[in-house]
Amino acid sequence: MTAPETESLRVRPETPRRPSWRAQVPVVAVVALGGAIGATARYAAGLGWPVRPGAFPWTTLGVNAAGCAVIGVFMVLITDVWAAHRLVRPFFGTGVLGGFTTFSTYTVDIQKLVDSGHARTGLAYLAATLFAAMAAVWLAVTATRRVLERRQR
């Protein structure tokens, strides 16, 4: 008796099907719309609270910290409280809050500060923004969960 061919006995796992590009159109559209809204709000904050060259960029720091806090609240709400429509997270989380928080401007601000001879300010800004962003998310998540726990009692 001969051994069966090993090739015919192998089970090939099915590769997961990628969604068609048509299924991604609504997601891309809501991210773009949300991004335009968030970026417009960020731009308005910059106009409302301009920072002079070489000064500590408080406006960008504040925008990033506020956006991170809202991300913390939002993520608790859509994961712990209610099941959101499939386009809510891409619209608000990725689009609006991604457009509002401005970590690309953060890096440009650091580069401008260093290039203009304000390396200490740039280094302080680098550290302060990272700390503020992480603290804002943590505080917002913690506070939101505590509020929700109290409401459930």
Image: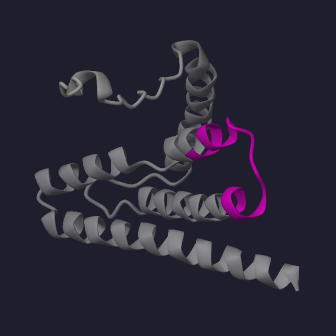
Residue 132 picture location, percent across and down: 43, 71
Residue 49 in the image: state x and y as whole percent: 51, 54
User: Where is residue 151, by image quadrant?
Assistant: bottom right
Q: Nearer the viewer, residue 28 or 105?
A: 28
Reply yes or no: does residue 1 show up in magenta. Answer: no
At x 27%, y 50%, the residue is: 107
Residues drawn in magenta: 77-93
Image-based side of 15 in relation to 93, left or right: left
| Color style of the picture | one colour
Q: Is residue 118 left or right of residue 67?
A: left
Residue at image location 62% in from the left, 59% down from the top:
75
Above or below, 17 relative to 86: above
Residue 145, picture quadrant = bottom right
Closer to the camera in the image, 48 or 86: 86
Image quarter (top left, top right, bottom left or bottom right) of the N terminus: top left
Q: Can residue 33 be seen?
A: yes
Name the quadrant of the C terminus. bottom right
Residue 33 position within the rendered picture, expressed as x and y whole percent measured from the top left: 62, 28
